[in-house]
Image (cartoon, rainbow, N blue to C red):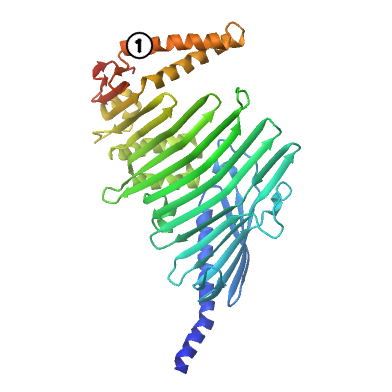
Amino acid sequence: MLGAVAVVVAGALIAPKFIGQNVHQQVQEQVAKLNEQAGYQASIKQWQQGWFSTQAQIDVHFDMAELDPTSAQELPEFPPLNIQLDIQHGPVLLSSQGLLGLASWQADISGEALRKNLTWTDDLPLYRLSGLTGLFGGHRFTDQIPAFSAAPQPGTTFTFSGYQGSGEIGQSHIQYAGHAASLSGNKGDERRLTVKDLRIQMDADVDMATMMEGGFYDSQAHVGVGEMQLTIPGTASKQAELKGLAINMTTKRNAEKGTGEMLVAYLADAVDVGEYQASELALEVQLQNLNEDVLIEYQQMAKSGSFADPEAMLDYVEEILPILLQDNPALNLSKISVTLPKGKINGYINSQVVNVEDMDGSEWTYKEFWLAHVAVDAKIDADREALLFIAEQHMLKQMQPAIAAGQLDEAQAKQMAQQQAPQMLDMLMQQGLMVETQEGLQSTFTLKDGEGLLNGEPVPLPL
């Protein structure tokens, strides 16, 4: 019995030394990976390793010319980041996230250089990431940004409530969730912005190494804002309110075909801008059948800065396009939807490359290639009253110069728009652009084998 206890105690005392050596190797590998990215230069400036703990300082510099060559001169110069790293070696830990593990760690970015512009609690860093690495390699972590405020000039203020997040990284699964209560900025009485209830969520069936490669994997991500209010100079009401804003992204991988797909949905529960109101807004952008090897290679070249030369980018496109198109990629606006006070509009526009087998490198530069190898299917359904409203607003916009010159007043312009809007819809139907249905008005378009059909009737293509 005493012998077993002695072995356990000895293991708890000796193991931290070996864990510390492994920590050093892991940090060096991560710094090396960061240096492989274009625009980043990272180095370990200090390293103090003891038996039970390690302290380090890592400096990260940014080269904006490599990150974004086209707009590097317009971007402000970013100060280098100084990361203070504090690691406790396991297996026995005194951590708020657990008592057993390989290591507990905390990375702080002090942000002291920003205190001349921002104000936050003295004893907190601007960003803190802390976590625990389990005995079998998984990670649990939290991150936080403290509440801060700024007054860059008289009459201008900016406040942020702070941000808290947490997540887990497993062998084949990553999840994360973060929240900030509010953000607001004022510039006198002219410009105001308030954002409430910012949320970030991510759930992915992937390991960290695969994610860093940039390939496809099954995942769901969400960025949402509960409410946003802002002023819009030059408008009658000068006030806009948006509720339930969200960007939802889903990715899927087809391992058998070596392809992947991505769906990005832009959503809003309600939008109120002066006289204009809308609800249930949705725009879904879908990419399908994307070659995974091409995507990984593209991202690696982009990270290395290989596309700083536009000619190099064009040469690469000509090289990989035949491979990319053979998988029949698709670009779809899979959902277009909005509800107006007087009706709904919804539809879709789907397009896909088809029947590409052997392709000459220059074929894609000719319109005949795309006519032969692109299929399109599109449909828009709309309530008549909703289209009348849009037509009225279009006409009012055209009349704005006359209103501004005093040739028309607002009441006259609105009356004329209401009278002419039905005529505009009738003209669209006479031209065959729209047809009447039991529910309202509809427009369909298909393109196949180079032939276009508009509402079932052949139509010459404007190419």
Residue hosting label 1: 426
- Relative to 400, is 242 above or below? below
Q: How many marks?
A: 1
Quarter the C terminus occupies? top left
Q: Is residue 362 visible?
A: no
**Residue 202, relative to residue 369: is it above or below?**
below
Q: Residue 192: horizontal and vertical position, in percent?
A: 64, 35
Amino acid type at image mark 1: Asp
Instruction: Identify the residue at image location x=44%, y=56%.
Output: 175
Foreground residue, 74 or 175?
Answer: 175
User: Looking at this view, is 38 or 262 the one in front?
Assistant: 262
> On the rendered image, what quadrant is the N terminus found in?
bottom left
Left or right position of 35 against 75:
left
Residue 375 higher or lower than 425, as above or below: below
User: Which residue is pictured at 39% across the width and 12% down the height?
Assistant: 422
Residue toward you, 195 or 84: 195
Q: Residues within 10 Å of mark 1 (few under 14, many from 20)?
A: few
Secondary structure at numbered mark 1: helix
Residue that appears at 40% across and 49% down = 220
Where in the figure is residue 271, as x and y percent of width and height? 50, 32
**Residue 267: image x %, image y %?**
44, 37
Q: Is residue 388 left or right of residue 158?
A: left
Residue 103's place in the image compared with 155, above or below, is below
Q: Nearer the viewer, residue 110 or 152?
A: 152
Q: Residue at x 54, y 74 (%)?
A: 93
Question: Quarter-wise, where is residue 345 in the image?
Answer: top left
Residue at the extreme top: 407
Q: Position of residue 14 (x, y in %)?
A: 52, 82
Is residue 90 among the parts visible in the rendering? Answer: yes
